[in-house]
Image (cartoon, helix red, strand yellow):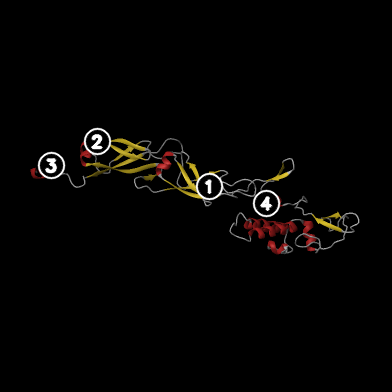
Amino acid sequence: MKNPYEALGVQKGAPAKDIKAAYRRLAKKYHPDQRPDDPRAKERFAEIGQAYEILGNEKTRQAFDNGEIDASGKPRFHGFEGGAHGDPFAGFRRAGAGAGQGRTHFEFRTSGMDGEPFSGADIFSEIFGQAFSHGGPQGARRTTRPEGLGDLNATLSVSIEDVATAAKVTAVFPDDRRIAVKLPRYVEDGQTIRLKGQGAETPFGERGDALVKLKLRPHKRYRVEGRDLHADLPVSLRDAVLGAKVAVETPTGKVAVAVPAWSSSDRTLRLKGRGLPLKSGGNGDFYAHVRIMLPEGGDAALEKLFRKNVESE
């Protein structure tokens, strides 16, 4: 068993607050759940806990410094019947052997800073600062999962259509689980959705949470400005000159929009409330930008008309 001072990386004369600080720092660092790929983490974590059981209590620390107990907390002497006040072996309890055996051994009881029994549950309490409570008919200890322990993270790419319609999407996590996620009505690029209790199992009998970070994918048709959407609207020369009703594709479906006669390219038509959901309720707007398109392959009648107009000038 490693010397407890070496295990915690402190000097022999270190004050109690430095010992506690070193313990908390190392226990967090080497907790097996924090270092799942480190085969030595469990052994190191147990070593740190054992060291703090010795040094975290004034009496047991003094007993170790005096050579009365070893690094594992066991007494170095046998056959001693303690019990007097001020005895450095007051931390040992005599367990009498059966009649006629003529042997005596001592059981070492570790204590916390307040003199109360110190257990593995107290170690977790020291690490994570969580309150422990007694409960159940047997007085068993229950714990609250430390914040962040057992949480799983995933990044989910979503489309503008997903955001506009609050769609149900699927997130894939590091443990290969696939979880369906119903998007809230209002979400933003980079927002994280917490799915309570759907993370990894923890030693506390409570699963962590699943955290889904949303990333908005660029769209080939729509441009996003705040909660408004912008898109190009192809319009034929005929419709631009004479005016017409044209179908506009939006994330929530097609909408007929009136293109006024003599509309030039880059004329903007506003479709109120057809953008992305607003946090305060309602929706942003959709802006269709007119783009006059000539017919592919040409138009003989249109060309003839223009030639006639040129000749008449």
- Neighbours of disc 2 within 10 Å: few (<14), some (14-19), many (20+): some
Identify which amino acid the numbered label 3 is placed on: Leu
User: Which quadrant of the rendered structure holds the N terminus?
Assistant: bottom right
- Neighbours of disc 3 within 10 Å: few (<14), some (14-19), many (20+): few
Q: Residue, x 75% and y 58% (percent of image)?
A: 54
Q: Residue furthest right?
A: 100
Name the residue beneath numbered marker 4. Answer: 124
Disc 4 to disc 2, C-alpha distance: 72 Å
Q: Are marks 3 and 2 in contact (CB under 8 Å)?
A: no
**Residue 214, position as x, y percentages in the image:** 47, 47
| Disc 2 secondary structure class | strand
Name the residue beneath numbered marker 1. Answer: 211
Name the residue beneath numbered marker 3. Answer: 305
Identify which amino acid the numbered label 1 is placed on: Leu
Q: Which tag, 3 or 2, sits closer to the chain's start? A: 2
Q: Are marks 1 and 4 in contact (CB under 8 Å)?
A: no
Q: Are marks 3 and 4 in contact (CB under 8 Å)?
A: no
Name the residue beneath numbered marker 2. Answer: 244
Q: Are marks 1 and 3 in contact (CB under 8 Å)?
A: no
- Neighbours of disc 4 within 10 Å: few (<14), some (14-19), many (20+): many
Disc 1 to disc 4, C-alpha distance: 24 Å
* Residue 14: mark in rendering: none
| Disc 4 secondary structure class | helix
**Please, is residue 147 above or below residue 285 in the view?**
below
Identify which amino acid the numbered label 2 is placed on: Ala
Identify which amino acid the numbered label 4 is placed on: Phe
Q: Are marks 4 and 2 in contact (CB under 8 Å)?
A: no
Q: Which tag, 2 or 1, sits closer to the chain's start? A: 1
Disc 2 to disc 1, C-alpha distance: 48 Å
